[in-house]
Image (cartoon, grey):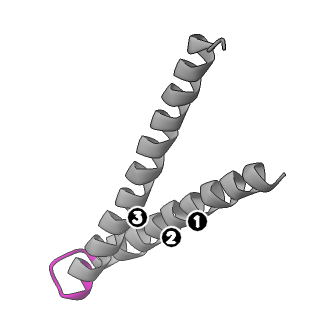
Amino acid sequence: MHIDWAALGSVFGVSLAVTVGLVGLFTLGIVGLTKREAAASGAGDPGSTAVARTGAYACFALCAAAVAYGIFLIVA
């Protein structure tokens, strides 16, 4: 049995990078929603509330798109 260590390392590196990126993107979405709730309680600027909410929803949409693409790759 022959193991292609370069390919295995490449798959590991890409998997690690995508995982860290996806978790970071989801974290940015959570932070955006937290800023929205802080602004709603009177601790923040109301103008930045819309930006934070839009950014959070965009982060969640990108996370959902990445998960959907992953499922597509597995099924196809």
Q: What is the spatial separation of the Cα atoms under label 3 and label 2, in whole angstroms? A: 7 Å
The residue most toward the right is: 76
Tell me whether the residue at label 3 lies in contact with that at label 2, contact meaning CB atoms closer than 8 angstroms: yes
| Badge 2: residue crowd in 10 Å (few <14, some 14–19, many ≥20) | some
Q: What is the spatial separation of the Cα atoms under label 2 and label 1, in whole angstroms? A: 6 Å
In the image, residue 32 above or below residue 72: below
In the image, residue 6 above or below residue 45: above
In depth, the one of 38 and 64 nearer the eye is 64
In the image, residue 21 above or below residue 23: above
Disc 2 target residue: 57
Disc 1 target residue: 61
Q: State the SS at label 3.
A: helix
Magenta segment range?
39-45
Tell me whether the residue at label 2 lies in contact with that at label 1, contact meaning CB atoms closer than 8 angstroms: yes
Indicate whether residue 42 is drawn in magenta: yes
The residue most toward the bottom is: 41
In depth, the one of 1 and 44 nearer the eye is 1
| Badge 3: residue crowd in 10 Å (few <14, some 14–19, many ≥20) | many
Q: State the SS at label 1.
A: helix
The residue depicted at 54 percent of the width and 59 percent of the height is 63
**What is the x, y in percent for residue 17?**
47, 35
**Picture quadrant where residue 75 is located:** bottom right
Tell me whether the residue at label 1 lies in contact with that at label 3, contact meaning CB atoms closer than 8 angstroms: no
The residue depicted at 25 percent of the width and 74 percent of the height is 45
**What is the x, y in percent for residue 14?**
54, 31
Q: Amino acid at mark 3?
A: Gly
Point out the tag, 3 or 2, that comes first from the N-terminus.
Answer: 3
Image disc number at residue 29: 3
